């Protein structure tokens, strides 16, 4: 750890390392230490039945069951220690220089969480030993709780990592020392770029803000792909796609708010359409080299469907048949209560009215939360 620390400029809860010297995925020695120490505890704490009289075997079974549950609960506690380290620090309210080192640490946490889940330490045959089946339910319950805690840790680490990469993407376009400063003025910068492109008298825009962010995200994903377990990379791409969609939703809201009941200017609509298509293209490309990626790409692109519908609402008159049919299409997408409330809230935020779903009660909506709050909480705060 002392040798590794030379390569990190900023304080981290503990030092991440590569799995094969200077290559391979990021991990930590913490996971290996935990498995080694607890494995030794399990080995010395369990009693050998052959060393005692048979009449004591039921007592030994009960004792071994307690030891096994304590062993498993220790891993559950380890997940909580990881989680505490993950949540105590705000990984994006920092300078741009810190983001890369933070991404290494977050990669290591996500990988450790994945490895813990797949490890033989949670295999019943490996840890039950001679424990009688009557104690199996309590052990399985403890085992499932520990595995679930590492699943949640993996999700949280991917969420934080995606926030760091998105913050780096925002920083790439504006040069702000703290990327979060850029969010409040993002739509204004986006609109200013359109005006600059119009003044250049070219058919194709030279200054696509979203395009620059996507290029940075694409480079970042290509970079961290070498540091992550395969399925974690797929999860990361999906979460980042959601964040990119929310960024475009913020543009939709602000553009709609500034135009009220008037139609949006064609250059603005054209740029928004280009940016939506460009974002799809970049995320599609990030998945091409992933094994068995066809279904994953389809699932990824389906995340853009709601955004496409909102673009349509922005581009057609509110009293047109096309507008009404689009609101009906949004209603059809609201297949479950959670997604229905999400779409209903988004329509409220963007100022659109229409039939969403008869199953949604007005009380489920939260009009007190504004679009910027939604974006910040969903895209950048776990």
Image (spheres, rainbow, N blue to C red):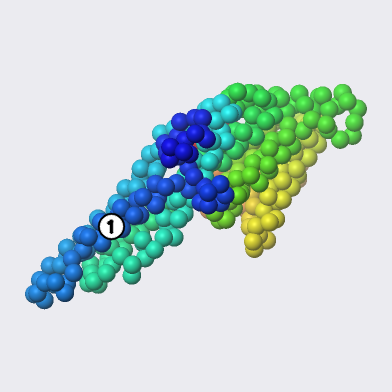
Near-viewer residue (103 or 51): 51
Looking at the image, the residue that sits furthest to the bottom is 54
Residue under the point 78% across and 40% down: 274
Q: Where residue 281 sits: x, y (%)?
A: 74, 47
Residue under the point 83% across and 33% down: 205
Q: Where residue 88 sits: x, y (%)?
A: 41, 34
Compared across the picture, whether 50 is left or right of 38 comes to left
On the image, which quarter does residue 230 sit in?
bottom right
Q: Quadrant of the N terminus?
A: top left
Q: Where residue 43 sits: x, y (%)?
A: 26, 62
The residue carrying mark 1 is 40
Q: Where residue 2 sits: x, y (%)?
A: 43, 37
Mark 1 is surrounded, within 10 Å at the Cα level, by few (under 14), some (14 to 19) or many (20 or more) other residues, namely few
**Can the viewer see residue 253?**
no
Near-viewer residue (356 or 380): 380
Q: Secondary structure at mark 1?
A: helix
Compared across the picture, whether 169 is left or right of 87 comes to right
Residue under the point 18% across and 66% down: 47
Residue under the point 44% across and 51% down: 113
């Amino acid at each position: 750890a002392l040798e590794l620390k030379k390569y990190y400029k900023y304080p981290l809860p503990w030092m991440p390392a590569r799995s094969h010297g200077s290559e391979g995925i990021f991990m930590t020695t913490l996971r290996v230490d935990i498995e080694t120490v607890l494995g030794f505890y399990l080995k010395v704490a369990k009693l050998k039945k052959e060393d005692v009289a048979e009449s004591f075997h039921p007592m030994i079974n009960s004792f071994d069951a307690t030891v096994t549950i304590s062993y498993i609960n220790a891993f559950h506690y380890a997940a909580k220690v990881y989680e505490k380290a993950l949540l105590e620090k705000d990984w994006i309210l920092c300078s741009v220089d810190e983001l890369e080192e933070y991404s290494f640490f977050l990669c290591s946490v996500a990988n450790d969480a994945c490895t813990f889940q797949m490890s033989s330490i949670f295999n019943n045959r490996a840890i039950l030993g001679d424990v009688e089946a009557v104690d199996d339910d309590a052990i399985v319950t403890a085992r499932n709780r520990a595995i679930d805690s590492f699943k949640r840790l993996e999700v949280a680490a991917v969420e934080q990592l995606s926030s760091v990469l998105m913050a780096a993407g925002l920083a790439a376009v504006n040069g702000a020392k703290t990327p979060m400063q850029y969010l409040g003025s993002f739509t204004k910068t986006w609109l200013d770029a359109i005006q600059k492109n119009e003044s250049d008298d070219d058919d194709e825009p030279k200054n696509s803000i979203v395009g620059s962010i996507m290029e940075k995200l694409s480079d970042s994903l290509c970079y961290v792909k070498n540091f992550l377990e395969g399925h974690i990379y797929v999860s990361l791409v999906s979460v980042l796609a959601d964040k990119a969609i929310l960024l475009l939703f913020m543009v939709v809201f602000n553009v709609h708010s500034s135009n009220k009941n008037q139609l949006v200017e064609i250059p603005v609509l054209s740029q928004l359409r280009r940016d939506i298509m460009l974002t799809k293209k970049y995320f599609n490309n990030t998945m091409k080299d992933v094994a068995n990626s066809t279904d994953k790409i389809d699932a990824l692109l389906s995340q853009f469907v709601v955004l496409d519908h909102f673009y349509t609402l922005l581009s057609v008159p509110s009293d047109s048949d096309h507008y009404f049919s689009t609101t009906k299409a949004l209603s059809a997408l609201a297949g479950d209560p959670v997604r229905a409330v999400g779409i209903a809230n988004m329509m409220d935020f963007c100022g659109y009215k229409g039939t969403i779903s008869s199953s949604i009660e007005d009380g489920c909506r939260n009009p007190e939360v504004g679009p910027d709050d939604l974006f910040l909480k969903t895209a950048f705060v776990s």
